[in-house]
Amino acid sequence: MITLAEKAYAKINLTLDVLAKREDGYHDLRSVMQTVSLCDDVEIDLDTGKPWKISCGAASIPCDERNLAWKAARAFFDRIGKEPDGIEIRIFKRIPSEAGLAGGSADAAAVLRVLNRWANDPFSVGELCALGAKVGSDVPFCVLGGTALAEGRGEKLSKLLDAPELHLVICKPPVAFATPELFRRLDSVEIKERPDTEAMLRALHSGDRKRIAGLLCNVFEQAVAGYREIDAIKKSLLANGALGAVMTGSGSAVYGIFRSADCAKAACDALITEYPQTFAAKTV
Ligand code: C5P
């Protein structure tokens, strides 16, 4: 039996714009995405000699073929046309689910990366991203990692220069939103404020942290305007020194960018009593 191990890093959206609804039911997006240090650990045993098994220690996450990590392994072995004699996937979760942090997609991407390495890299990163797109819209970015502009359904990725190191506090309130429902809500409202993606790309290029923080924008915030918790966390992050704060993806996690690791730690300590799922992190 062989055991493989890989880190599965969460993502945040520095900007997120939702454009037109497409004929296939998905929406075209434009989003600057960024990998962060908050991560799950993924371990895979190959050749267990037993039926496929997956565990993740979180009651709310399905531990069967519905799990994105399982789907990723299935897609990988179907594509290479052979498979080991049984596999077991163990996921040690830290990334909160229903948070907009792509926790499930990060696990799926880690599975694809580690299996590709184990098989001596039969697929290029681009091919692995294409395989990931069949599993979920955020998986291709999680395969690529770093800083990237995502377009189309989220699968058209342009790699960007790595963002400067940004110190973050990520806070996940108990409220959870269903992603398809938020897309539907956006379809029925007029989006009043959209991110200035081009300005964000320039700010990233020049490494201007303050400017990056000032340009954070996510149109999904307009679909959850009725939820006071999101606004309350943003205000709390700003009151505790954040240079900027925004919800990530379809929420419900909100993050802030801080001047230094010490500032982020102090803000994390201030929020964690009210919101136990609060994490200090940084861009990776
Ligand atoms: O691809 P994924 O399974 O992560 O998407 C979940 C749901 O989010 C889709 O079924 C769709 O309703 C919505 N979605 C969308 N446009 C995207 C990504 C997701 O409408 N670009």
Image (spheres, helix red, strand yellow):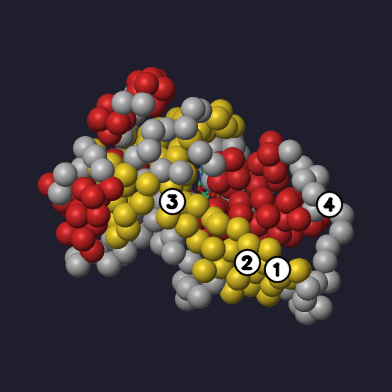
Q: Residues within 10 Å of mark 1 (few under 14, many from 20)?
A: few
How far is the residue under mark 2 from the one under mark 3? 18 Å
Question: Is the CB atom of the residue marked by disc 1 within 8 angstroms of ligand 1's nearest atom?
Answer: no
Rendered residue at 19%/55% (across/down): 266
Rendered residue at 47%/57% (across/down): 39
Q: Amino acid at mark 4?
A: Ile
- Checking the image for residue 3, the label placed there is 1
Q: Residues within 10 Å of mark 3 (few under 14, many from 20)?
A: some
Label pair 2/1, CB-CB below 8 angstroms: yes
Q: Residue furthest left?
A: 239
How far is the residue under mark 2 from the one under mark 1? 7 Å
Above or below, 272 relative to 52? above
What residue is shown with label 4?
80
Give the foreground label among 4 and 3: 3
Query: Residue 20, percent across and down?
Result: 48, 30
What residue is shown with label 2?
43
Query: Residue 70, percent across and down?
Result: 66, 63
Give the foreground label among 2 and 4: 2
Q: Amino acid at mark 2?
A: Glu
Label pair 2/3, CB-CB below 8 angstroms: no
Label pair 3/1, CB-CB below 8 angstroms: no
What residue is shown with label 3?
37
